[in-house]
Amino acid sequence: SVVVYESDLVTEVHAEFGDPAWIKQITRLIDGKDYVDVEYVVGPVPINDAVGKEVVSRYSTTIENDGIFFTDTNGRQFMKRKRGDPKVFGYDTPDFDPKLEPTSGNYYPVNTAMFIEDQSRSFCVLVDRSQGGSSLSDGSVELMIQRRLLHDDARGVGEPLNETDIGITPCPPYGDATRIGTGAIIKGTHRLMIGTKGANQARSQMDQAFSQPHIFVASAPRDVDIPFHQPGLSMLRASLPENVMIVTYTALDEEGNTFLIRLAHQYDIDESNIHSLPAHVNLQDLFPNQDIVSVTEKTLSANQDRSDWEKRRYKWNDYMKEEQSDDARLGLQTNVVVLKPFEILTFEISVSPFK
């Protein structure tokens, strides 16, 4: 069944598949947004016909991608993939015959985004969880959203991928590993975007789609006056540049005077004419109610000072340029740092008590 709902703010198309319906999909177009959200609910996947099933969402376009598609690696660099690539396992390995695994041999992990493009158009799908994806024919993008199998696929787990809502009895020799309950129900969202440059389109929304804000609410009696100290709270004094994300914001002491901060540049080189440029961030903007006392740059894992690591770093050749000193790199006089494309910087920052 298909039902269309329209208003001044949003248009939704509600569709159900199966008898009885076990796949539900809402396609949502919000006025003023440059994307389309496809929200799906799948399950319980029926197995009364004794046949396992793999459920995919496939989006078809007229883009001529010539078997090329791109998937991200942990939300960072986009990797170029080619359908039927005989060197899929590496260029120092024997050629792989794509005919042996025409479907699974072309599936790749998608952590946050996948896109196809040609000379003038691009189509991108953003996910809210890691999924497997591929482009099995030109112009198409598909992602596996659920699977329920009745036979072991010989991939190491030693049991069918048949997840149920209650669980499983103990494995041998303590039980027979029987699944209990009905099939699991999953819910997720794909965000669809079109444009001219796939990577640029994906970067603009991938963090919002994958890491949506958590909303917390609480209840109280109607006649109780809640003593709010302030009507709103922001951890920023000013907005960050559009190409910068706070990856870590963690207090290192109980007093809340020392913090571990990681800032990440979200665009790679040449992905955008604007957002692939270096970004400037004033660290003081991260502490609107406290003054910065000191800033120390750390290595990415934050287990040592960057300056100490640079001194011990092996110099591969005489032409290797020396890294800038902390003073030049951080701009300690102004607390302004510069992030190059795709760079992640880690800092330990000491601040004054709350004002």
Image: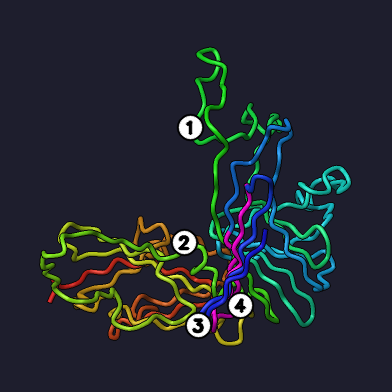
Give the position of the N terminus as an image quadrant.
bottom right
Residues at marks 3 and 4 touching, judged by CB atoms closer than 8 Å: no
Disc nearer the start of the sequence (2/1): 1
Q: Find disc 1 in the rendering and name its residue.
A: 166
Q: Find disc 4 in the rendering and name its residue.
A: 269
Q: What is the spatial separation of the Cα atoms under label 2 and label 4, in whole angstroms?
A: 25 Å
- 155 above or below 118? above
Residue 125 in magenta? no
Disc nearer the start of the sequence (3/1): 1
Q: What is the spatial separation of the Cα atoms under label 2 and label 1, in whole angstroms?
A: 52 Å
Secondary structure under tag 1 reads loop
The three-letter code of the residue at mark 1 reads Ile
Q: Residue 112, percent across and down? A: 57, 62
Q: What is the spatial separation of the Cα atoms under label 3 and label 4, in whole angstroms?
A: 10 Å
Residues at marks 2 and 1 touching, judged by CB atoms closer than 8 Å: no
Q: Nearer the viewer, mark 2 or mark 4?
A: 4
| Picture residue at 69% right of the left edge, 68% below the top | 115
The magenta span reads 22-39
Q: Nearer the viewer, mark 2 or mark 1?
A: 1
